[in-house]
Each structure stands twice: as structure tokens, then as C-alpha cells.
Amino acid sequence: MQDATTKDVLMMAWMNVESVRLTLEQRTTWFWSRSRQELWRKGETSGNIQELVELRYDCDADCLLALVKPVGPACHTGNQTCFYRRI
């Protein structure tokens, strides 16, 4: 996910056909949890949803990029982005 305004990279998550369909229909991001084997809506418990602006796919059609308007931080730690640590 990428902030549609600032272009900050917010997070990375898996999607399946159903989560893509729900994301496009509801205009908020839905993902597939590989560990729980279930769909989840970003912000369902925290309130930190991501309003979908645009959904793009790459030249190989094997990767999606969601441009979003975040409502609150993207990371479960409270950080704006999940990519706040350096190696």
C-alpha cells in the first residue's frame, strides 16, 4: 500500500481474488491472512482504515499496488508506515 498523497510506502500484505473483489466493491482495503487462512479488513478493529483511491497492477500482472488515503497509522505498532526500521 502506498499513500496516494505523500507516496509513502505504508505496508505490504497478501491479497487473493476475494480480497481484491471486496477492496474494489467497498473502496477500503481487504487482505488475505496466510497464517490465519482468512480475510481481514484493514482497520476493522483499530479504526485505521485505508480508503482506496486506485488499484494498479504491474507489467507482469503478478503484483498489485493500492494507492490509499490512510485514516490513521498503517502499522499495528502505531507508526505511520510498517517500514520505519533500518538494517
Image: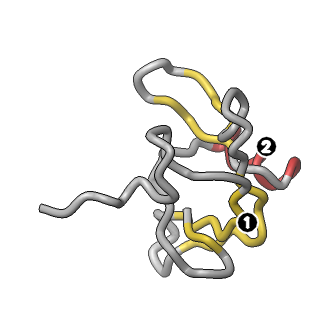
List the single residue furthest toward the top: 36
List the single residue furthest toward the right: 25
Picture residue at 78% right of the left edge, 50% below the top? 28
Quarter holding residue 6: bottom right
Residue 74: x percent and y percent? Answer: 56, 51
Residue 66: x percent and y percent? Answer: 63, 65
Q: Amino acid at mark 2?
A: Leu
Picture residue at 47% right of the left edge, 58% below the top? 81
The residue that disc 1 covers is 69
The residue that disc 2 covers is 22
Element assignment for label 1: strand
Comparing marks 1 and 2, which lies closer to the viewer? Answer: 1
Is residue 67 depicted above or below 12 in this figure?
below
Where is the C terminus found, in terms of image quarters?
bottom left
Q: Amino acid at mark 1?
A: Lys
Q: CA distance from mark 1 to mark 2?
A: 17 Å
Residue 59: x percent and y percent? Answer: 48, 81
Where is the N terminus found, in terms of image quarters?
bottom right
35 relative to 66 in the view: left or right:
left
How many neighbours does mark 2 have within 10 angstroms: few (below 14), some (14-19), or many (20 or more)?
A: some
How many neighbours does mark 1 have within 10 angstroms: few (below 14), some (14-19), or many (20 or more)?
A: some
List the single residue furthest toward the left: 87
Q: How is the image coloured?
A: secondary structure
Residue 84: x percent and y percent? Answer: 34, 60
- The mark that comes first in sequence, 1 or 2, is 2
Most foreground residue, 22 or 62:
22
Picture residue at 44% right of the left edge, 29% below the top? 34
44 relative to 16 in the view: left or right:
right
12 relative to 20 in the view: left or right:
left
Q: How many marks?
A: 2
